[in-house]
């Protein structure tokens, strides 16, 4: 008997917990590391752990770019990871259908966060001639989260297209109104 | 390959402009490659093609002074292009994939209609 939560045309459910939990775990780890870096930037800690690059982390974390906004970028990163973790947890295993809005939001949150991380990785040597180990770790985590999150996003987009083809309102589909969920595959 | 490109300037002692080039292209290649390890985004690896082409062109455009840097860039570019030819095997079905979001008659629509009847 075919699992009803698998989207039509697919052979697995991208919104299954086994698919989403690893991403949420990664987001939590990213959150912890980014919070640690933010606490250093806010002077709660005097030093930051840097096993490979000597002064590198201090240089990067104290740079003008990292303090360009009123909140240090470590804190912004931590907030981003928190949003990712929460958005990954909300909703049941059919959320590609019952809650397209959270799937789309999740996809948009993960993509730009990853790309900003890559941008910061580029800035390290190009602008400051220094490297920051933990910053590189969090950037790696951000990028690794992108691939596995995109399948849910794709499933929701396909579903919204089917709903629209059936004459359902895109708005009601997007927000998971029951009349659409029950009548559109 | 992307990570090697990031490290190469330190191994070979590039000048600043050449190092910057590697430090920008390297992470981009690594990112595209990482994203492409997921089957539903595997075509993101094709973004590595323009990056590899840039690696071939940049020594001329920027003006490299070091033969080692030039050979290194060319070697990386060739390896990347060669690897792009290898298509990863499909293991899953995605209802027609990303094009199915705008094209008609795709697998997910057909199967949805069958489920109804």
Image (tube, rainbow, N blue to C red):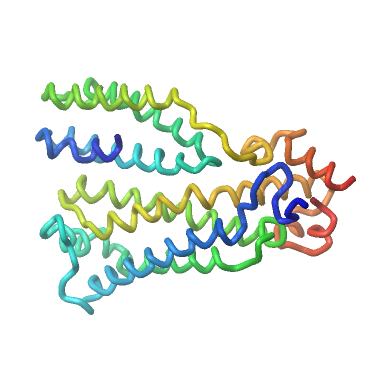
Q: Farthest bottom residue?
A: A44
> Residue B39 appears at what percent x and percent y?
53, 40
Residue at 53% in and 52% down = A149
Residue at 76% in and 59% down = A172
Residue at 28% in and 50% down = A121
In the displayed structure, B72 sits above or below B107; it is above
Left or right, B70 with respect to B51, comes to left
In the displayed structure, B1 sits above or below A100; it is above
Q: Farthest right residue?
A: B117
> Residue B95 appears at what percent x and percent y?
68, 40
Left or right, A144 with respect to A91, comes to left
Q: Nearer the viewer, residue A180 or A4?
A: A4
Q: Nearer the viewer, residue A74 or B86?
A: B86
Left or right, A98 with respect to A152, comes to right
On-image quarter of the N terminus of chain B? top left
Q: Nearer the viewer, residue B112 or A77?
A: B112
> Residue B7 appears at what percent x and percent y?
19, 40
Q: Farthest front residue?
A: A1
On-image quarter of the C terminus of chain B? top right
Asked which quadrant contains residue B60, the reply is: top left
Q: So how many labels did they put on this image?
A: 0
Q: Nearer the viewer, residue A147 or A175?
A: A147
Asked which quadrant contains residue B57, the reply is: top left
> Residue B6 appears at what percent x and percent y?
23, 40
């Amino acid at each position: 008997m075919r699992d009803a939560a698998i989207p039509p045309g697919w052979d697995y459910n991208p919104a299954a917990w086994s698919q989403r939990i690893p991403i949420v775990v990664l987001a939590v780890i990213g959150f912890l590391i980014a919070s640690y870096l933010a606490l250093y930037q806010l002077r709660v800690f005097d030093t930051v752990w840097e096993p490979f690059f000597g002064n590198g982390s201090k240089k990067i974390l104290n740079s003008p770019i990292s303090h360009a906004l009123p909140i240090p970028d470590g804190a912004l990163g931590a907030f981003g990871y928190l949003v990712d973790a929460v958005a990954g947890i909300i909703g049941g295993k059919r959320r590609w259908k019952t809650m397209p809005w959270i799937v789309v939001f999740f996809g948009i949150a993960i993509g730009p966060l990853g790309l900003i991380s890559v941008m910061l990785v580029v800035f390290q040597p190009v602008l400051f001639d220094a490297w920051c180990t933990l910053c590189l770790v969090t950037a790696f985590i951000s990028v690794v989260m992108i691939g596995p999150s995109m399948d849910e996003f794709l499933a929701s987009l396909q579903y919204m297209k089917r709903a629209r083809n059936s004459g359902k309102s895109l708005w009601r589909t997007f927000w998971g109104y029951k009349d659409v969920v029950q009548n559109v595959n | 390959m992307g990570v090697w490109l990031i490290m190469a300037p330190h191994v070979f002692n590039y000048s600043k402009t050449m190092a910057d080039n590697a430090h920008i292209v390297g992470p981009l290649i690594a990112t595209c490659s990482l994203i492409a390890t997921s089957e539903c985004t595997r075509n993101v690896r094709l973004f590595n093609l323009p990056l590899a082409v840039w690696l071939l062109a940049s020594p001329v455009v920027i003006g490299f002074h070091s033969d080692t840097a030039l050979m290194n860039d060319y070697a990386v570019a060739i390896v990347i292009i060669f690897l792009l030819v290898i298509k990863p095997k499909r293991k899953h079905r995605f209802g027609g994939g990303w094009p199915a979001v705008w094209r008609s008659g795709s697998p997910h629509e057909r199967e949805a209609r069958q489920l109804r009847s």
